[in-house]
Image (cartoon, rainbow, N blue to C red):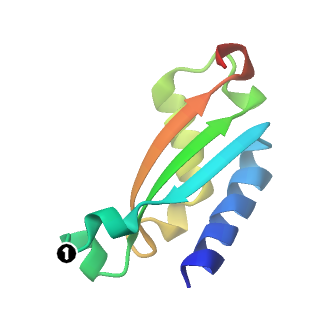
Amino acid sequence: MSDTRMDRMRGRFQAALSPVELVLEDDSAMHAGHAGAASGGAHYNVRIVSLQFEGLKLVTRHRLVYDSVHDMMHSEIHALAITALAPSEV
C-alpha cells in the first residue's frame, strides 16, 4: 500500500507544482509505535524544487505542498516534513 500511496503523492506534487526536482521518502519505520503510525498514517519527507516557489515565503510554499495532498492528510499521511526550494536557491 505504501508504494501506491507514494505514487499518488508524487503524481499530485508533479501535477500541482511541476517540480524540477522531487525526492519523496517514507520514514514511517523510524516512527514505529508512534500514535500516528497506529492510525495507518505514514511519515514522509519531501524535497521539492519548483519554479512556482520563486519569490514566495516559506509558509506559502508549504501551503502549496500541503494543498496538493490535503485530502490525504491525517488519514494516509500523518506527518510530512517539507523542504521547498526555488531553483535559484539550489
Q: Residue furthest front?
A: 30
Q: Position of residue 40 (x, y in %)?
A: 36, 81
* Mark count: 1
Residue at 69% across, 53% down:
13
Q: Position of residue 34 (x, y in %)?
A: 20, 69
Is residue 14 or residue 45 the one in the foreground?
45
Q: Position of residue 43 (x, y in %)?
A: 39, 62
Is residue 72 or residue 8 the one in the foreground?
8
The quadrant the N terminus occupies is bottom right
Horizontally, residue 51 falls left or right of residue 30, namely right
Q: Which residue is mark 1?
A: 33
Q: Is residue 17 above or below residue 28?
A: above
Q: Image quadrant of residue 75? A: bottom left
Q: Is residue 11 above or below residue 75?
A: above
Residue at 57% across, 60% down:
69
Q: Position of residue 79 (x, y in %)?
A: 37, 58
Is residue 90 or residue 73 the one in the foreground?
90
Q: Is residue 22 above or below residue 26?
A: above
Horizontally, residue 6 falls left or right of residue 11, namely left
The quadrant the C terminus occupies is top right
Question: Tag 1: Cα neighbours inside 10 Å, few (<14), some, or many (≥20)?
Answer: few
Residue at 29% across, 75% down:
37
Residue at 58% across, 41% down:
47
| Residue kind at label 1, given as amino acid type | Gly
Could you tell me which secondary element the residue under label 1 belongs to?
loop
